[in-house]
Image (tube, rainbow, N blue to C red):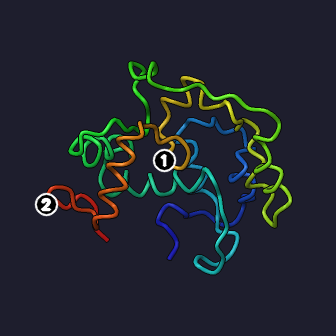
Amino acid sequence: TVPVYVVNPRDNDGNLVVSISQGLQQYDWDAHVGALAAMAPNWPPGSVCVYHPMTYGFLAGELVRRTDGRTIGRFVADEIAGPLGMAFWFGLPQEQDHRVAELSADDKAYDWVRQGEASAYPAAFLHRRLSATAPNSRAWRAAEMPAGNGQGDARSLACLYGVLANGGIHHGRVLISP
């Protein structure tokens, strides 16, 4: 089935939305989900599987927001990171910036983009603002982009994966279920 927020006829090129070349602000949640809601599917839902590196997080996060009322960052903080005592965020608080390692990049850091541009769906990799060092900015760190900027330390990620490996149960409490 088509998500409820895919409502308009096919008057928009989905490749433009995926590539964020319509002038959307990279960190603007409402702009992204609004653009995704306005576009029609490029093929019948469920008939093709295509990797869309950043938009997937907006789609999944909007499902959480529309069913629960909280943003994905608030939901994860309240329901997963908080109960587990994890230092993990979608939307890093500024007071946590001192814990973040800065990224650097040489030309090989963009090999994945060049490979994507040679694929059957090159527009998915033509994000004009996405770079290997984009996560160094305060705007990136603060944004809730669940497909691209979950931020936490190794201990917290190990805790999260341990819960997943244990069927979603942590100390007898079900946190995540199928």
Q: Residue furthest left?
A: 172
Q: Residue at x 78, y 63 (%)?
A: 121
Residue 60 image offset from top left, x and y in percent: 47, 57
Q: Nearer the observer, disc 1 or disc 2?
A: 2
Q: Are marks 1 and 2 in contact (CB under 8 Å)?
A: no
**Which element is circle 2 on?**
loop
The amino acid type found where label 2 is placed reads: Gly
Residue 109 image offset from top left, x and y in percent: 75, 40
Q: Residue at x 23, y 58 (%)?
A: 175
Relative vertical location of residue 113 with respect to residue 176 in this rendering, above or below: above
- The disc, 1 or 2, on the residue closer to the chain's N-terminal end is 1
Relative vertical location of residue 46 with respect to residue 177 in this rendering, above or below: below
Q: Residue at x 28, y 67 (%)?
A: 167
Badge 2: how crowded within 10 Å, few (<14), some, or many (20+)? few
Real-space CA distance between mark 1 and mark 2, rounded to the nearest whole angstrom: 27 Å
The amino acid type found where label 1 is placed reads: Pro
In the figure, is residue 49 to the left or right of 68?
A: right
Residue 125 image offset from top left, x and y in percent: 75, 51
Residue 135 image offset from top left, x and y in percent: 59, 31
Q: Which residue is mark 1?
A: 146
Closer to the camera in the image, 85 or 35: 85
**Which element is circle 1 on?**
loop
Q: Residue at x 65, y 58 (%)?
A: 52
Q: Residue furthest bottom?
A: 47
Badge 1: how crowded within 10 Å, few (<14), some, or many (20+)? many
The quarter of the rendered structure image containing the C terminus is: bottom left
Q: Which residue is mark 2?
A: 172
